[in-house]
Amino acid sequence: IFNIMAVLSMAIHAWIGLWAVLTDYVTVRTLGTKATFIRIFLQLLMIAVTLVYVLWAIDIMWGI
């Protein structure tokens, strides 16, 4: 249980940190009109990768 809590904490920490970086640096002022699309794409990609890592870690810890 504690291992899963650690993995989930790490995933939440990664989400908050990368969300802050993306919203601070991927802006219309720095990248132009396509910044919103790029930021949303990167956030969705980050969610997908983080979800895969969490599910993989759970599979490793609770798998056979």
Image (cartoon, grey):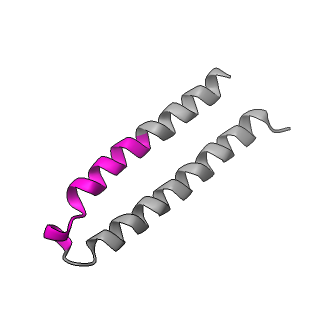
Query: Viewed as shown, does residue 43 lie left or right of 5?
Result: left
Query: In the picture shown, does residue 50 fall above or below 27?
Result: above
Task: Name the image quarter holding the C terminus.
Answer: top right
Residue 17 in the image: x percent, y percent? Answer: 34, 43
Across the whole image, how many numbered discs are drawn on residues? Answer: 0
| 23 vs 10: above or below | below
Residue furthest toward the right?
64
What residue is rendered at 35% in x and 49% in y? Answer: 18
Q: Residue at x 63, y 26 (%)?
A: 3
Residue 4 picture quarter: top right
Quadrant where the N terminus lies?
top right
Main secondary structure type of the part rendered in magenta:
helix
Q: Residue at x 20, y 73 (%)?
A: 31
Q: Find out whether residue 18 is within the magenta segment.
A: yes
Estimate the x, y position of residue 2 in percent, counting from the top left.
63, 21
Give the farthest residue toward the bottom.
Answer: 33
Q: Residue 8 lies in magenta, yes or no? A: no
Which segment is the magenta one? 14-31
Q: Quadrant of residue 24?
A: bottom left
Q: Residue 38 or 6: which is nearer the viewer?
A: 38
Task: Tell me residue 44's x, y (percent).
Answer: 48, 61
Does residue 13 appear left or right of residue 59 in this picture?
Answer: left
- Is residue 10 toward the left or the right of residue 21 in the image? right
- Give the farthest residue toward the left: 29
Residue at 47 percent of width and 56 percent of height: 46
